[in-house]
Amino acid sequence: MKKLIGVFLILAFAMAGCSTTATVQASTPEAIKPTVTLVPTVVPTATLMPTAIPTTIPTATATPVFTAERQKIQAIMEAYGNVDEKDLTDAYWQKLSDQISKYGEAKRILTLEYHGDNYNMYNGAYSMDPAEFETQMRYLLANDYHFVTGPELVGYLEGWLALPARSIILTSDSGAASNLSIPRISALFKGLEAQYGITPHMISFIWTASMDPKESNWCKNDACWQFFRDALNTGYFTFGTHTETHRDFSTLIDADTTWDLQTSMKAIHDNLGINVYGISWPFEACSTNPKLIANLGFKFALGGYSRDRNQLFTYANDNEPLCLPRLFPPNPDGLSGRPGGMTLEQMLDEAMNQYSPLN
């Protein structure tokens, strides 16, 4: 019993001690308590963003020009067998339209006859070198001339295509001997196009007999036809025929004319894949049977002075498209041999005078 009383007394004192300790802790000064600083939470204010109002007004799409004419040009290209897409673009035809607005429509156009860019014929009366050729091309480009392509010449001659008064028709009689000049002209045209933003163009007529490897060492291993293929792919050339046998076609009977032209046309088609529709007559002697030539599929042919020595230019709606005139470009001395003594500027100015046709 005494033991139980002792235990209770111990428990009592223990409980009393706990109570005392609790009281001391409760009375601890506030100064020794850790201070907690409350940082107020900042609620961001919503910013009202103004609705963006478009400042760019949509530009109306320009109406394409020459749409009907372009369809006809494309049809000619397709029949020819080579479609040059860059000559069908809106930009190309808009520029043509702008040139017509600026200079007026061409009533007649100067056609120049080259033999590549390096030749000397008729004892120097008809000559050219690469430097002079480049000078003449730069003059035309600097003065904003339009270079007429083969399909465009067809449209102009038939009267359904207007061309700017500042237009030029460049032609060249070509063959195996053009193995250097054609690649050189292609490279020059590429550089000039990049510089001036205008595409030069030349209508080149191939003398097909000269392309036979048996006639020329230049043409071994298909070398001659290959440089013409390369030129065709540049888009700087329209090709026609300078005939197969290079004879005087004003003296040939119809059977010989037909055989010659069909033979030449086939050679060009077999090697270049195109169907030509233009001729440059050897010796500038036009055929005396234009109906036969038209029936063979030709749209134009060039005869120099064959038709009329007073008619120097190619006219819109020309009534003799199979015997068109050509003039000689100036020689390196700056003067032409046909018509004698005229500069390039004088010939171009004469064409711009827009006289009535003499035919």
Image: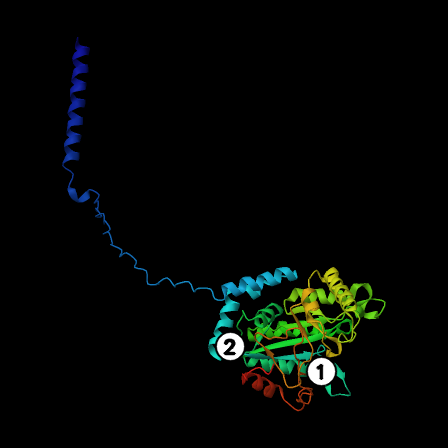
Vertical side of 196 occupied by 59: above or below: above
Q: Residue 306: where, in percent of width, then height?
A: 70, 81
Left or right, residue 34 beside residue 311: left
Disc 1 designates what residue? Answer: 129
Is 303 positioned to the left or the right of 354 in the image? right
For the residue pair 68 and 211, the one nearer the viewer reads as: 68
Residue 136: x and y, percent?
63, 82
> Is disc 1 in contact with disc 2, using a CB cutoff of under 8 Å?
no
Marker disc for residue 210: none
Secondary structure under the numbered disc 2 in the rendered image:
loop
Q: Tag 1: residue type? A: Asp
Here the colouring is rainbow
Q: Is mark 1 on a helix, strand or loop?
A: loop
Name the residue located 69 percent from the left edge and 75 percent from the top edge: 172
Residue drawn 18% across the image and 14% down it:
6
Q: Which of 23 and 80 is in front in this view?
A: 80
Whole-percent x and y of residue 88? 55, 64
Image quadrant where residue 185 sits: bottom right
Between 6 and 219, the one nearer to me in the picture: 219
Dot placed on the residue nearer the N-terminal end, 1 or 2? 2
Quarter of the picture holding the C terminus: bottom right
Q: Name the residue under label 2.
A: 105
Residue ID at (28%, 56%): 51
Q: Which of 77 and 46 is in front in this view?
A: 77
